[in-house]
Image (cartoon, grey):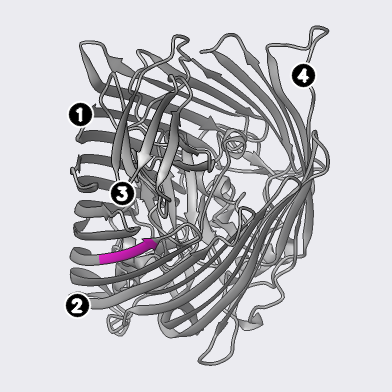
Amino acid sequence: MKGRIFDADTKLPMSGVSVTLSPSNRQTMTDGHGYFSFRELCAGSVEITVSSLGYTDEKRHLQLTSNQTINFQLTHSDVVLHDVEVIGHAPTQRSTAKIISLSEQQMDESRGENLAQALSKIAGVSTLNTGSNIAKPVINGMHSNRVLIMNNGIRQEGQQWGAEHAPEIDPFTAKKLSVVKGAESVRYGADAIGGVVLVDPAPMPIDKTLGGELHAVGASNGRSGTFSGTLEGNIKKWNNLAWRAQGTYKKAGSIKTANYYLGNTGVNEIDFSTALSYNTPIAKFDAYYSHYDTELGIFTGAHIGTLEDIQAIIDNGRPFLTYDFSYDIASPRQRVKHDLAKLKAHHDFANGASLDVQYAFQRDHRQEYDIRRGDRDAIPSLNLQLTTQSMDISYDHLKSNGLRTIVGTSHIMQVNNNIPGTLTIPIIPNYDSYTGGIYGIERLVKNHYELEAGLRYDYKYFDAAGYRLDLNNPTGTEENYGQELYGGTRTFHNITGSLGAVWHPNAKWDLRSNLGLAWRPPSANELYSSGLHHGAALYEIGDDQLQSERSYKWVNSAHYEDEKWRFDIDLYGQYIHDYIYAQPSSGEFIQTVRGTFPVFRYEQSNARFWGLDLNAQYQINTQLNYHVNAAMVRAKNVSDGTYLPYIPSDRVTHGLRWEVPATNQEGTTRWTSPFIQVDHQYVARQSRYEPESDYAAPPAAYHLFNAVAGIKYKANSAHTLGMSLGVDNLTNTLYKDYMNRFRYYTHEMGRNITLRIQYIF
C-alpha cells in the first residue's frame, strides 16, 4: 500500500506526517514529497490513521486485497498553533553516508561564532586558525580545497585555497549546519575528498503571515557586539508566495589573551540575504540572494621582516611590543565581499519522481592590504575577483519497490581576475575554468537495510596566464628580479564512485559502511602560484605539472540509542594518491622590499590518513546528562614515511548538563528550558611532526574549562524570549594551539564572557 498526503488548504504535499496501521500498529512517516508506503501487508481489514501537529487526524477503514494507492488531504484543527509550519517539497535524506548535524541547542549556543567555530562542536571537526578571528573547518585532518561547503544548495566558491581565507558565510542564515564525513564526490563533484559542510536555511514559511527572529550577542573579549534579524511570511493575496529578509551586523575590537592584547585584531561585518518561494501542488520556485561583507584585522606582530626577527619572537614566546584595546583596523588587513544569487525550480511528477533545475551566480572579491612604505597602505597588495556561474539538474525517482534512482548533471564556469593597480606581482595568475559532470546513484531502501551505489564522471578545462618573478634573472629592480610570462592550459578528468550500506538490526542500532573514490584537480595556487602570499608571510611557488589527487576513503559508523545511552562512533581510513602539499624549500629564501621570506614549493606524494571520532551521551537521571566528544587522526607521507604538517592533535571534550526544573506552586510557568552546563576540554600536544619542517616545535597540551547557563520565557504560543550566559576559558589559561598559524608569536584568546539573547515571534 502507498499514498500521498496534502494540505487541504494549500494543496501542497506534507512531509513528516505520521501514518499508522491498526491492528498491527505499524508506523511510517511521509518523505519530503509527501509520499508514504507499507510493504509486505497481509490481506484483510485495516484502519489507517494519519496525524500531524496542528491538523485534524484522518482515519479510514480499508479492506486490503492487493497493492492499493490512497491519498489524504489534512485540514487544520480548530486550535491553530502559529509556531507550526507546513513545509512542502522539503529535501529528503538521499545518502547512506554519515551526516551529523548540530542540535538546536548547539545552534543556539553557537550564535555569534563563525562557521568553523560552530562546526567544531561535532566530533572529528576542528579548526585551522590564522590568529584569533580567521578560522576554517577541518574534517578528519583536511581543510580548504579538500572540504566542500554547500551554502543553501550551492557550492561555495571563493579563494578557499588560502589557509587564512575563511568561508564567506554568515551562520545566522542557517537553520541547520551539518557535516558529511565520507568522500562524497559522486553527489557533489570534485573537491569533496575530506568531507562536505551543509549550510541549510530554514524552510520557507507557507501559512505564516508575519514572523521572525532577533538575535543579540555581546562578548567581553574584543568587546564585540553582533545583531541579527530575520523577517518572513507570506502574502495574503497570493497564499503560495513566501518571503524572507535577513541581516547581520558585527563589530569587534582587539582580542586579549590571558594577559596581553593582540593589536589590530578587530572585525567589521555587514551581511544580508533575501529569499522568495512560490509553491503549487506539483512545483516550487525559489529565488535567493545574499551579500557578505567583512573587514578583518591581521595581528600587527605577524608582519616580521627577517629570519632573525622570527627566531627572536619565537624564543620570547610572545610579542615584544604591547598593544592597547582598539576598534581601529589598520594594515595588514583583509576586505572580502561575496555575492551569491540562485534560481531554482522543482517539479513533482505523478509517478513519484521529481526534477530540480538550479542556476547560481557568485562573485567573490578579496582584497588584502599589507604594511607598505609611504601612503601605499591604502592600496591592496592582493586584489582578486572570482566570478562563478553554475547549473545543476537532477532527477530523483522513488519507486514502490524501494528502489530510488538519482541522475544528474552539473556545470561550472569560473573566471578569476587580478584587478590592476596593486603595485605588486600577483601570487596567482588570471584564469578561466570550465567543469562539467554527470552522475547516477541507485539506492535500495528496505525496512532493515539500505544499499547504495553511485558513479560519476567529471571533466575540467583550466587556462591560466600571468606574470611572475624570474628568479633566475636578477635585474636590480625594486624586487631584485625580472618578470616572465607564464601559465598555460591544463585538462583534468576522472571517474569517481561510491558504495554504501546501512543496517538497522533493531530500533536501537544503526550501522553504516561507506567506501568512496574521490578526486581533486590541483588548484590555481598549487599549479601557478609565484609570489608573496601576504597573509601567510610565505613566498609560494607552484608546479604546473601537478596531477590530480585521487582518494579512497572507507568510513564505518555505529549509532546506538536507548533510554539512557546515545553514542556515535566513526572509524575511517583514507589513502590519497598524489597528495599535494607545500614543502619548505631546503633553506631557500627570497628578499623583497617587504622583508625576507621562506620559499615554499608545492610537491606531491602518496598519503595515508586514519582516525576515530566518538560522541556519547548518558542520561544519569531526568535532569542530569553527561556527554563526551573525542577525536584522533593520524596522517603520514607514505612515500618517505614522514608526518604531514598541520594535522589536529588528539582532543576530548566532556561535561555535565543539568536541565533545571522550572515550575511554580501551581506546577506551571512561562519560564521554560532552564539549564546549566560545565565542560572540560583537553587537547594533547602534537607529537607526530617533523622537527626540520617547522620554525618551532608544537606547543604543550592544554586544559580549558567552559560554562554556560540559559533559560527561555514563553510569552504566548507565538512569542519566545531566550537568554544564555556563557564563559569560555573560565580559568583564563595562557596557551597555544598547534592548529593556529600564528602560534609562533601569540597565544590564544583568554577568558571570554558571552551574553546571547534570542527573540522568536
Q: CA distance from mark 3 to mark 4?
A: 53 Å
Badge 3 marks a residue whose secondary structure is loop
Percent position of residue 690, x then y: 63, 82
When asked about the image quadrant of residue 87, the answer is top left
Q: In this image, 98 relative to 518: left or right?
A: right
Residue located at (23% from left, 71% from top): 458
Amino acid, disc 3: Ser
Q: Most extreme residue toward the bottom, as rendered? A: 640
Q: CA distance from mark 2 to mark 1?
A: 45 Å
Q: CA distance from mark 4 to mark 1?
A: 43 Å
Q: CA distance from mark 2 to mark 3?
A: 59 Å
Does the CB distance between marks 3 and 1 fall below 8 Å? no
Percent position of residue 158, x then y: 33, 53
Amino acid, disc 1: Thr
Percent position of residue 1, x then y: 35, 46
Q: In this image, 623 relative to 232: left or right?
A: right
Residue at the disc numbered 1? 280
The residue segment tinted magenta is: 440-444
Identify the mark at residue 662; answer none if there is no mark.
4
Q: Examine the structure image and report whether residue 441 is included in the region drawn in magenta.
A: yes
Identify the mark at residue 435; answer none if there is no mark.
none
Residue at the disc numbered 3? 66
